[in-house]
Amino acid sequence: MSSATLLNMVVLTLTNPAEAARRLLAMRLGSDVLWMAFFLAVILNALVQTASGFVLPLISPDVEHVAEPISRTLFVSVSAILISVVTFLFVGRMLGGVGSFYEVMTLVIWLQILQIAGQAIVLAAVSVAPFLFLPASLAILLLSLFITLHFLNEAHRFASLGKSFLVMLISGVLAIPFVLWLSPG
């Protein structure tokens, strides 16, 4: 994929996530490509999380820097992505969806890579203008939820975003014990 095609896919995801999902799914990426993208997303996420551990305390003295071992950061990243894929898949199927593991994985990984890029941009911006942290982080969260709704709708071939919202809601509830288990302290 060329850099122009990649940039066009990013813009399409932000402006028309349903169409972006259809195009991503039409690529029918092989399992080898998806698992490579998965591990790339895990490594990039760990790097951004580690960087944020150094940048955020510089922005606000109230934020304590608690360095976690990279192995833990990698484990949490692997777990979080896999939990998302599995819960989105099974809850979607419980609600009548027909998405496959690799279809859901394709869309979750793409979204994860976009979120990582967004977090990196926020970190760079807040090192110059710290007041941007909260509004930029909130914007990324809301945009991620909006994109996820459309991605789940396309992956499971639902006829409404309402079912996608239910998938997100139920998946979130099911993931809470895992999130608590993965959280430090």
Image: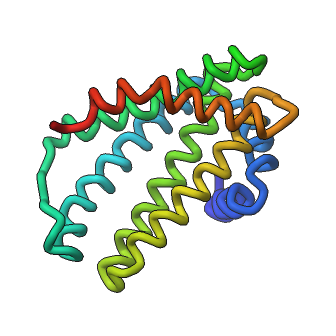
Tell whether 73 sits left or right of 170.
left
In this view, the residue in front, 101 or 84, is 84
Q: Residue 179 placed where, x, y %?
A: 35, 32
Colouring convention used in this rendered image of the protein = rainbow
Q: Above or below — where is 23 with respect to 57? A: above
Image x and y of residue 77, in percent: 35, 37
Q: Position of residue 32 (x, y in %)?
A: 53, 26
Image position of 52 (left or right of 105): left
Outermost residue, right direction?
A: 159
Residue placed at 61% from the left, 49% from the top? 145
Q: Is residue 151 above or below residue 7?
A: above
Q: In this orientation, which residue lies closer to the viewer: 33 or 41?
A: 41
In the image, what residue occupies the spot 35% across and 77% down? 126
Percent across and percent down for residue 174 are: 48, 23
| 72 lies left or right of 105 | left
Where is residue 33, by image quadrant? Answer: top right
| Relative vertical location of residue 25 with respect to residue 89 in this rendering, above or below | below
Considering the image in quadrants, where does the C terminus appear?
A: top left
> Does any portion of residue 94 appear in the rendered image?
yes
| Residue positioned 75% across, 27% down in the render | 156
Count of numbered marks: 0
**In the displayed structure, does residue 69 sit left or right of residue 47?**
left
Residue 75 visible somewhere in the drawing: no
Q: Identify the image quadrant of residue 34.
A: top right
- At a point 40% along the width and 64% down the height, the residue shown is 120
